[in-house]
Amino acid sequence: MQYMERIQNLRKKAGVSQTYIAELLKVGQKTYSDYELGKSRIPLESMIILAKYYNVSMDYICGVSDIPNPFPRK
C-alpha cells in the first residue's frame, strides 16, 4: 500500500475531513486532496505530523510496514 492510500484510510477511519487535516498541516484542502490523490508529494514534516496525530509509526504511514505500531514518544 502506498502512502497516499494509507493517509486516506487513516483519515477516514478517524472520521475526520480533508479540511480538518489540511488545517492541522497548515495547507489548503486542495493541497491535502492532492496528497491523497498522489498529485503532489507530501512533505516529510507533514508525514511526521500525521504519524503523531494518528499515533502510528512512520513505517506504517509510509507503507513500509502493515503493522500500525504506535508513534515512538521520547
Image: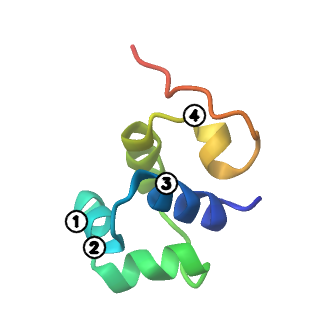
Find the distance from the CA under tag 2 to the CA under tag 1: 6 Å
Q: Which mark is residue 41?
A: none
- The residue that disc 2 covers is 19
Q: Quadrant of residue 20?
A: bottom left
- The residue that disc 4 covers is 57
Amino acid residing under circle 3: Lys
First reached walking from the N terminus: tag 3 or tag 2: 3
First reached walking from the N terminus: tag 4 or tag 3: 3
| Residue 42 place in picture, x, y as percent | 50, 66
In the depicted structure, whether residue 69 falls above or below residue 45 = above
- Foreground mark, 2 or 1, reads 2
Which residue is at a point 42% across and 49% down the rendered structure image?
A: 50
> Left of 48 or right of it: where is 36?
right
Which element type, helix, strand or loop, lies under badge 3? helix
- Foreground mark, 2 or 4, reads 2
Amino acid residing under circle 4: Ser
First reached walking from the N terminus: tag 3 or tag 1: 3
Find the distance from the CA under tag 3 to the CA under tag 2: 15 Å
Q: Quadrant of the C terminus?
A: top left
Find the distance from the CA under tag 4 to the CA under tag 3: 16 Å
First reached walking from the N terminus: tag 1 or tag 4: 1
Q: Residues within 10 Å of mark 2 (few under 14, many from 20)?
A: some
- The residue that disc 3 covers is 13
Q: Quadrant of residue 39?
A: bottom right
